[in-house]
Amino acid sequence: MFQPLALYIGLRYTRAKRRNHFVSFISLSSMLGICLGVATLITVLSVMNGFDEEIHNRFFAMAPEMTIRLEHGPAPDWLALRDEVKKEPMVKGVSPYVGGQGLLTVKGQSSPVFVTGITPKYEAEVTTLAQKMVQGKLDDLKPGEFGMVVGETISENLGLNVGDKVNLLIPQMSISPIGMTPRFKAFTIIGIFSAGPGFNFDSSLTFIDQQDAKALFSAGQSIAGLRIRIKDVYAAPTFSQELQQKVGRDYYVGNWTQQFGPFFKAIKLEKSMMFLILSLIIFVAAFNLVSSLVMVVNDKQADIAILRTFGALPRTILSIFVVQGLFVGVIGTLLGLILGLLIATHTTEIVDFLQNTFHTHFVSAQVYFLDYLPSKIMPSDIIRICVAALVMSFLATIYPAWRAARTEPAEALRYE
C-alpha cells in the first residue's frame, strides 16, 4: 500500500529497536507523561464539574433565580403581573411571596429566621421545597390555620416536631391599651424540610401560607414580590435587564448574581486555574519529548545524510521527525483519554472504596457541602484537554525536526 515517504519512515522509526535504550526510555516516559497529564486533567475537571453542578442544584432548589419587588406605586394585581411575566419564553415558573425577618421563640429558646409566605401550588414552579420535606407535607399549609414549615437545623436547635407550637415575633409594633408592643403570632409546625448542608437554608428559612403572611406583616392585598425560575440561570443578568424595561420603574428586578455571583465566579476561576496548573504535567512531558527527539536526530545522522544524498528534501526530513513526535503525542493523548474517562466515570466508587479501606473520610459535608465525590464529564473539557495535549506535542517536535532538516550530508558522513 502506498504511503507518503515521511509518514512511512516516521512510523518506522517509532517501531524500530534503537541501539540507545536511553532514548527509548525517554520517549516512553514522554508518552506516559502526556497520558498521565491528560488523565489527571480529565479527572480533576470532571470532579470540579460535579461539585459545580451539585452546588447549583442545592442552591437553586431553594433560592430564587430572579425576583421582582415593588419599589413604589399602588399595590399591584399580582395575578395579572404573574401572568404577564409567565408569557416570557425564558420563564419556567413564577411564584408570589411575602417575606420578612422574624424571631422564633419556644420554651425560652429563640432563633432568628427569614419568614416567607408562599402558596404551595405556585411554589412548586420555582423551588423543590416539596421534595425536601422530611416530615409533613408542604400542601398542609392552609390559609387561616397559621401553619409553619421550618428547616431541620432550626427544629433540632429548638427541639421542635410536627404539631408543636412556636411564637413568631416580627420587627413591627402593634398599638394596644398598654402602649406599643411587638407583633407576634403563634404558629403550629406542620412540616420540616432538609435542604442539606451549605448555604444555611435549614438554619435560616421558614415558610408560612401567603395569606397568613399578609395578615402578619400587614401587607393587605399586596405582595412583597414574585420569585421567578428561568431556563438558563447564567442568562439571569441579561434577562433581568430586559424584564426591568418591560415591568417599569415601579418594580425592582433582581437576580442571583447580585448576591451570590462572586461565589460562583470563584468556582469558575478555580477550575480555570486548575486547568492551567495541571497542564504543566503535559508541558513537562512535551519537554521530555523534545529531549528524546533531539537524541533520535543525533542517533540518525547517518540515515538523514543517506536520505539527503538520495534526493530527500529538507522539508521531507522535517516531516519525518514531526510524524514521529506526533505519534508519541497522539498515543499518549489517547491512552490518557481512555484512562481519564475510566477514572472520571467511577470517581465516586473509587473514593468510597478508599474511604472504606482506610476507614477515613476524604470528603466532609461540613467543608464541601457533600459527603461524596461527584463527577460530571463535559465534552467541551475533553476536547480542550486533547487539543492542548496535541498542540504541545506538535510544538515539541518543531526544534528537533528543524535541526534534522539542517543536517548536511557531507558533515554527517565524515566519520562514518
Image (spheres, helix red, strand yellow):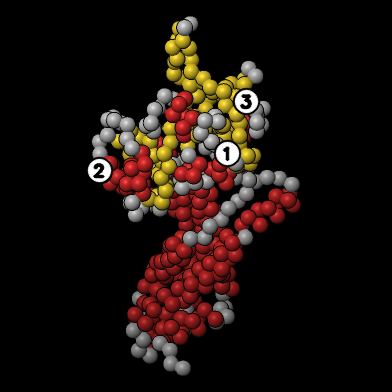
Percent position of residue 383, x then y: 44, 65
Mark in front: 1 vs 3:
1
* Mark 1 vs mark 3, CA separation in Å: 15 Å
Is disc 1 placed on a helix, strand or loop? helix
Crowd band around label 2 with a 10 angstrom C-alpha radius: few (<14), some (14–19), many (20+): few
Residue type of the residue flagged with mark 1: Asp
User: Who comes first in sequence, dot 2 or dot 1?
Assistant: 1
Residue 48 shows up from this direction: no
- Please say if 14 is above or below 84: below
Residue that badge 2 annotates? 245
* Mark 3 vs mark 2, CA separation in Å: 45 Å
Crowd band around label 3 with a 10 angstrom C-alpha radius: few (<14), some (14–19), many (20+): some
The quadrant where residue 302 appears: bottom left
Residue that badge 3 annotates? 165
Is disc 3 placed on a helix, strand or loop? strand
Residue that badge 1 annotates? 140
User: Who comes first in sequence, dot 3 or dot 2?
Assistant: 3
Depth check, front residue: 42 or 158: 158
Mark in front: 2 vs 1:
1
User: Who comes first in sequence, dot 1 or dot 3?
Assistant: 1
